[in-house]
Amino acid sequence: MPTSSRRRFLASALSLSPLARAQAEKPIRGIFPIMSTPFTESKAVDFEDLAREVEFLDQCGVHGMVWPQLASEYTTLTKPERRRGMEVIAKAAKGRRPVLVLGVQGPNAAAALEYLEHAESLAPDALIAIPPTDAASAEDYRQYYRALGAATRRPLFVQTTGGARGIIPDVEMLVEVAREFPHLGHVKEEAEPVIPRMKTLASHWPVIRRVFSGGAGRGLLYERRLGLDGTMPGAPYSDVYVAVWDAWEAGRRAQAGEIFGKLLRMINLDQVVPGARPYIMKKRGVFKAAVSRRQPVDLTPEAIAEIDFHFEALKPYLKGWTVSARAG
């Protein structure tokens, strides 16, 4: 079949499939938090809390949820932990409104295809893949995503950072891959210069179907002004991101800015006080422990007081749980 005919066939088949109809009911747009991975005090994965996090995010009103990615500490997880985590989340997410996006990245295409095969068995709404860390060139990135694109029909987000050091996929390559595999026309853009790259990607619609940001959603209001599609921030303040999104969508731009200003204080604090995120997930009653495999979480009384001070300003916008949730 000629290449152009094959592309038309793939696009037509995708648009008519039951999968595509289900996706139409769950738009890939909005606030898609990267789920945190909960750990016990002994640093084992707490799968009970991982399922609980799905319920928490649903109550926060998020439009989607994503696991595992860099903010999930995925590089510290074993293959059995990642596979079981996918299973736990897929079961907990079944029948819920948010789009479920499972991360299938690996150091190379062979490893990623193993995760993709397992993810496919769980029927998520979409997939995401960080670039391969074993790559030696941008061409290796291209072949990696082509392999994934050939192995699934689900929407698959191509992330532009987190792969081999010093290699950033150019926009032209992303567009070319999306032309060949239309379901790869979803991009999580984090490479600098982020906003110009996002605008260029968006100019290639409908080949590029969705353009999301990362970076803790720091550019959310600017991205909304540009008409971009969503962001993938961290999980602890998910309901506040939703409040910003909803206010903007309703035309309440001043309110969106006011809420976002308070949220930016917490986003900044994540950088200033390492361990703020797991502390908030415990404070809100989602996780039993504030533990990370990536870094010690040993907050001083002064650090806790600083986190609590800024978090207080977010309380009017919280839909998810608070510290009292586990007592109930």
Image (cartoon, rainbow, N blue to C red):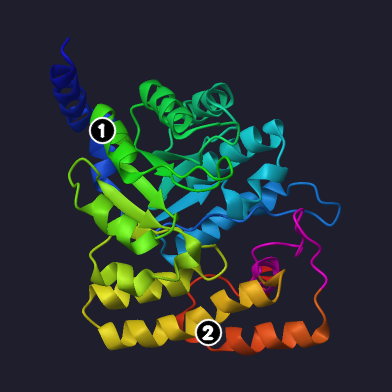
Which secondary structure class fits the magenta region best? loop
Image coordinates of residue 226 in percent, x first then y, are 24, 67
| Quadrant in which the N terminus appears | top left
| Location of residue 176 (image quadrant) | top left
User: Residue 182 has which mark?
Assistant: 1
Q: CA distance from mark 1 to mark 2?
A: 41 Å
**Residue 125 in view, yes or no:** no
At label 2, the amino acid type is: Lys
Q: Are marks 1 and 2 in contact (CB under 8 Å)?
A: no
| Location of residue 154 (image quadrant) | top left
- In the picture as drawn, the residue positioned furthest to the right comes out as 42
Q: Which residue is mark 2?
A: 315
Name the mark nearer the viewer: 1 or 2.
Answer: 1
Q: Which residues are magenta?
A: 277-298
Question: Quick one: label 1 or label 2, which is nearer the N terminus?
Answer: 1
Q: Is residue 104 above or below residue 7?
A: below
**Residue 6 belongs to magenta span:** no
Determine the residue positioned at 66% across, 68% down.
Answer: 285
Determine the residue positioned at 68% across, 72% down.
Answer: 276
Determine the residue positioned at 53% across, 84% down.
Answer: 315
Mark 2 Cα shell of 10 Å, populated few (<14), some (14-19), many (≥20): few
Image coordinates of residue 28 in percent, x first then y, are 31, 50
Image coordinates of residue 244 in percent, x first then y, are 37, 76
Q: Which type of secondary structure does the marked residue at label 2 adopt?
A: helix
